[in-house]
Image: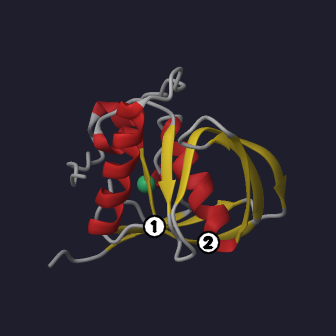
Amino acid sequence: MAVLEIRKAGDKILKEPAAPVAKLDKRIRRLLDDMAQTMYDADGVGLAAPQVGVSSRIVVIDVGDGLIELINPVITETKGCMIGQEGCLSVPGVMGEVERYAEVAVEALDRYGKKIKVVGAEMLARALQHEIDHLEGILFIERANTISTQVQR
Ligand code: NI
């Protein structure tokens, strides 16, 4: 496994819609491993493939309940709404208040191509929506009502 370079806001790849994964092979499974390691190394709770320079619909998330790997994820159900603080490894030092669905259901493939469904509320729901936004080339700062910057140390 390897820690990959995280692309920062301003990088063109973060603005592009990512392509669906057509073939789930060893290369994709290695990318999933590297993405998880990169996310943990950066103390993040989620990471999308465009953030490591790969324009494919792949996401890893861990909000503290274990690693979730999603390939070609699609939000299929939504419920309610919530407002809360969000940050992004590609936008370091910036927090913003973003309105999201309170609960979402997401259908995707796992690393072996099996169909899976993830239902999340609160932090998981927020992470799912934030990461799937990355696959559409959308950063949270575009959705934020208010933005605050923190001093980098
Ligand atoms: Ni992000």
**Spot occupied by residue 59 in the image (x, y as percentages of width and height):** 50, 47
The crowding category of the residue bearing disc 2, from other C-alpha atoms within 10 Å (few below 14, some 14 to 19, many at least 20), is: some
Q: Residue 45, which numbered label? A: 1
> Percent position (x, y) of residue 6?
25, 50
Q: Is residue 143 visible?
A: no
Residue at point 38% right, 38% down? Answer: 50
Task: Work out whether residue 102 or residue 107 is closer to the camera in this orientation and state it.
Answer: 107
Q: Is residue 121 above or below residue 137?
A: below
Viewer-side residue, 153 vs 116: 116
Where does residue 37 sit, x and y in percent of width and height? 31, 59
Q: Is 9 situated left or right of 15 in this image?
A: left
Q: Which quarter of the rendered picture does the C terminus lie within? A: bottom left
Q: Report if residue 99 is visible in the image.
A: yes
Residue displayed at 68% across by 73% down: 122
- Tell me the number on the disc at residue 123: 2
Amino acid beneath label 2: Met
Identity of the amino acid at label 1? Answer: Val
**Residue 26 against residue 6 in the figure, above or below:** above
Ligand 1 is found in the corner quadrant, namely bottom left
Residue at the far left: name it: 153
Q: CA distance from mark 1 to mark 2?
A: 9 Å
- Please tell me which residue is depicted at 41% across the width and 35% down the height of the picture: 28
Circle 1: element type: loop
Mark 1 or mark 2, which has the lower sequence index? 1
Residue 153 is tagged as none
- Within 10 Å of the Cα at label 1, are there few (<14), some (14-19), or many (20+) other Cα atoms? many
